[in-house]
Amino acid sequence: MADKLIPTESLVQFYKRTGQDIPSDLLRESGKAHFNVREALTCTRKTPFNRRDYFKICLSQTPAKASGILLYNEQEIPLNQCCLIFTNPAVATSIEVNIPFNRFYCLFNAPFIEGSIPADIQYACPLFNPSLMPVIPLTREDRQRISTYFTQMQMLQHTDYPFKWDMIRHLLQLVIHEGIRLQQSRETPATMVRDRLVKDFLTLLNQQFPVDSPESPLKLLTPAHFAGLLHVHVNHLNSVVKKHTNKTTREIIHERVITEAKTLLRNTNWNISEIAYALGFEYPSHFNKYFKQFTTQTPLEFRIGTKTTAPGKLS
């Protein structure tokens, strides 16, 4: 019961709490893509313990005399050297520091990266998979290399280059990949999350996408479908996937189908019935109900809403 009392901080609340101007894209319309990166001096001794409705990556450049603690659910993780910190929106976190220190951070919401991070990469990154350690220690060389990515994102953000958001997404993916690579290179075989069954499941899932034609609808839509092809009991598949991704098999399938639905609604001239059939729905009414369950909009409402250019997205 106490867990339900932990608040969730919105992007607008974050900007208010940190004394920053609220970006105009957040004031105009909710649910639009948002990204921001900046270098800052952390003076707050303790941030609020809460969840967030956005993703955040910090590159701490901790001075030798500094120390701190990341409260991550029930863990207390020491912050006593340069590190990357990936915070998952669903996990309540707070940072305590003893003296101010410099850091880069970038924050962004789900619409900004929608469809750009494959499921297998999400599974391997603590930004999306809360079962992984969120703090990754860095050497001086690591910090210098990764800080270059943050500097480039910061520079691009303030340019008029029409494709800057695509470049920023690529740089953001480099930071994510750096975190995965460094984390895996420093873990022991006993602690590395490398379950073959999960990888095989994600491979089968990803092989179905992108959907190229309404005449070739999705075939694998339930955990049982995947379990049959993987020659395991569906309960075993669900158990292993939940253990290593902190999501159920069904949740991962739903997320991928919804992502593809949004892509088709945004980028094709297929009618709603064609999209529904392509995604494995026999009746458009079932697709409408399914889509609204996960997005709070009907497919048609979503399509109409994307006619206008979203902040951080290309028209």
Image: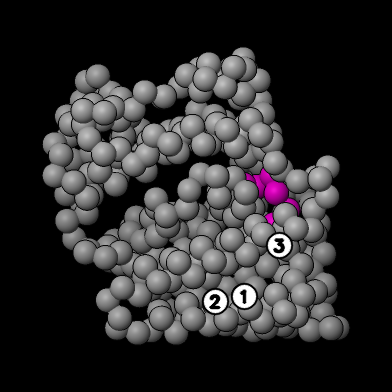
Amino acid, disc 1: Ile
Q: Secondary structure at mark 2?
A: helix
Assign the N terminus to one quadrant of the image.
top right
Front residue of this view, candidates 278 and 100: 278
Disc 3/disc 2 C-alpha distance (Å): 16 Å
Amino acid, disc 3: Leu
* Residue at the spot of label 2: 149
* Residue at the spot of label 3: 182
Q: Main secondary structure of the magenta part?
A: loop
Q: Position of residue 284 (x, y in %)?
A: 20, 25
Q: Secondary structure at mark 3?
A: helix
Indicate left or right for 155 with 175 as reference.
left
Colour scheme: one colour
Amino acid, disc 2: Tyr
Q: Position of residue 132 (x, y in %)?
A: 70, 49
Assess whether mark 2 and mark 3 are in contact (beta carbons under 8 angstroms).
no
Indicate left or right for 70 with 257 as reference.
right
Numbered mark located on residue 222 in the image: none
Part of the protein shown in magenta: 129-134
Q: Is residue 77 magenta?
A: no
Q: Position of residue 47 (x, y in %)?
A: 67, 67
Which residue is drawn at the image coordinates 30% and 30% (left, top)?
Answer: 279
Q: Position of residue 73 (x, y in %)?
A: 72, 49
Assign the C terminus to one quadrant of the image.
bottom left
Neighbours of disc 2 within 10 Å: few (<14), some (14-19), many (20+): some
Assess whether mark 1 and mark 2 are in contact (beta carbons under 8 angstroms).
yes
Which residue is drawn at the image coordinates 53% and 16% (left, top)?
Answer: 228
Q: Is residue 76 visible?
A: yes
